[in-house]
Image: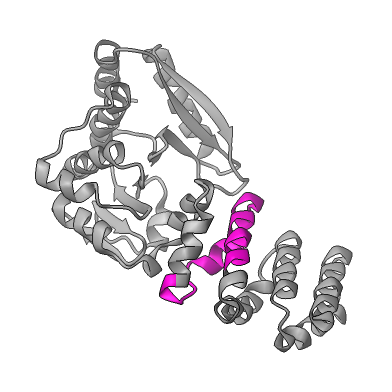
């Protein structure tokens, strides 16, 4: 932290009206320690800020969670510091300013939305790009934003083929590089097809207890949303559980639609761990479709964990008894 960055952060002692709590998601990632050190230094400089540490998955990218809607996968430095301070002040005041026309559009964003913006400490255009997005988070709880330092996490930037900053990505389907109009972003969020929801947004719905709403969307579209397969095979049990609740609704209301999961999930079967395999086999049994019997027999004849073999046998028995 440079002297100038320290001076910027110290202004929070005057601007924060009350104590605020932020989160620190830690993991075994090599950058987790540096982000923790930044948070420790932040609380030393600004006693009103308290950090609640959370254990993420071993391979999870560490992050600073300003509130439910905003994560920083970065150690704010250079030009990144000013919008980071703005985010903390917004958390304190919970008052955001936005023009009336944009606000009217924003209130009609009913689908969960996941945004990622890639920035860097040297980028002079990045602070304004982040500032434009911050009010959206406090005015609509359906919106989530992750701010990612492309220099600090080059593997993430490479994965998304980031060529320049700032780059804003919405649900893997839309991206803007350089400057953008906030009205355009809001219009895309408001008008997009529910079938284009990404796995992060579907996970948001499940965590918020909206499994029934997600099932209703797919039943209305008569389509299994492409990202839904990822949450069905998610490594975290609570996410899979929510997805399985959705499947119960689909099985009950449109069995032919529900059966569409068989081939895509079988293609993922050998790539997931044994716990996920067991849940997928349970779903196969619930569908009671004989076309999956050859695959179940392959498992029973293979070298699998005893619990996986047991789940395969239970699925096979359920299908044969239907």
Residue 155 in view (yes/no) = no
Task: Give the magenta-colored segment's residue range.
Answer: 220-249
Q: Residue at x 34, y 51 (%)?
A: 116
Q: Nearer the viewer, residue 14 or 283?
A: 283
Q: As drawn, is 202 to the left or to the right of 84?
A: right
Locate residue 210 relative to residue 256 in the image: left or right: left
Q: Residue furthest front?
A: 253
Q: Is residue 214 above or below residue 128?
A: below
Viewer can see residue 45: yes
Q: Position of residue 29 (x, y in %)?
A: 56, 44
Horizontal and vertical percent for residue 181?
A: 13, 53
Task: Pick whichever, 95 or 130, lies toward us.
Answer: 95
- Locate the C terminus and report the quarter of the image it occupies: bottom right
**Apparent side of residue 45 relative to residue 58 in the rendered image (left or right):** left
Instruction: Pick whichever, 16 or 317, lies toward us.
Output: 317
Residue at 57% across, 72% down = 253
Q: Is residue 136 magenta?
A: no
Q: Which x, y percent locates residue 53? A: 55, 28
Name the chief secondary structure element in magenta. helix
Q: Residue at x 46, y 76 (%)?
A: 223
> In the figure, residue 263 lies in which quadrant?
bottom right
Query: At 54% from the left edge and 65% from the top edge, which residue is drawn?
Result: 230
Residue 239: in magenta span = yes
Quadrant of the snapshot with the N terminus: top left
Question: Where 290 sits versus 85, above or below?
Answer: below
Where in the figure is residue 246, as x and y percent of width and height? 57, 62
């Amino acid at each position: 932290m440079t002297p100038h960055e320290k001076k910027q952060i110290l202004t929070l002692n005057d601007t924060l009206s009350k104590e605020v709590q932020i989160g620190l998601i830690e993991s075994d990632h090599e950058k987790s320690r540096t982000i923790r050190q930044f948070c420790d230094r932040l609380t030393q400089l600004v006693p009103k800020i308290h950090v609640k540490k959370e254990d993420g998955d071993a391979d999870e990218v560490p992050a600073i969670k300003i509130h439910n809607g905003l994560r920083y996968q970065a150690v704010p430095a250079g030009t990144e510091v000013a919008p980071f301070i703005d985010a903390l002040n917004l958390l304190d005041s919970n008052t955001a300013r936005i023009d009336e026309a944009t606000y009217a559009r924003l209130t009609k964003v009913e689908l969960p939305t996941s945004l990622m913006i890639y920035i860097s400490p040297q980028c002079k255009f990045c602070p304004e790009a982040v500032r434009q997005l911050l009010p959206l988070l406090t005015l609509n709880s359906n919106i989530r934003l992750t701010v990612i330092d492309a220099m600090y996490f080059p593997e993430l930037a490479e994965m998304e083929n980031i060529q320049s900053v700032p780059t804003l990505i919405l649900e893997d389907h839309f991206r803007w590089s350089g400057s953008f109009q906030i009205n355009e972003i809001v219009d895309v969020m408001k008008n997009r097809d529910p079938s284009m929801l990404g796995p992060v947004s579907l996970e948001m719905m499940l965590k918020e207890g909206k499994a029934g709403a997600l099932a209703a969307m797919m039943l209305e579209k008569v389509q299994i949303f492409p990202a839904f397969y990822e949450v069905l095979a998610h490594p975290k049990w609570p996410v899979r559980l929510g997805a399985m609740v959705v499947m119960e609704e689909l099985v009950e209301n449109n069995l032919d639609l529900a059966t569409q999961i068989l081939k895509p999930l079988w293609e993922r079967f050998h790539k997931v761990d044994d716990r996920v395999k067991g849940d997928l086999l349970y779903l196969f049994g619930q569908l009671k479709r004989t076309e999956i019997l050859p695959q179940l027999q392959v498992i029973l004849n293979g070298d699998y964990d005893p619990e996986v073999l047991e789940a395969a046998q239970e699925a096979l028995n359920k299908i044969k008894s239907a």
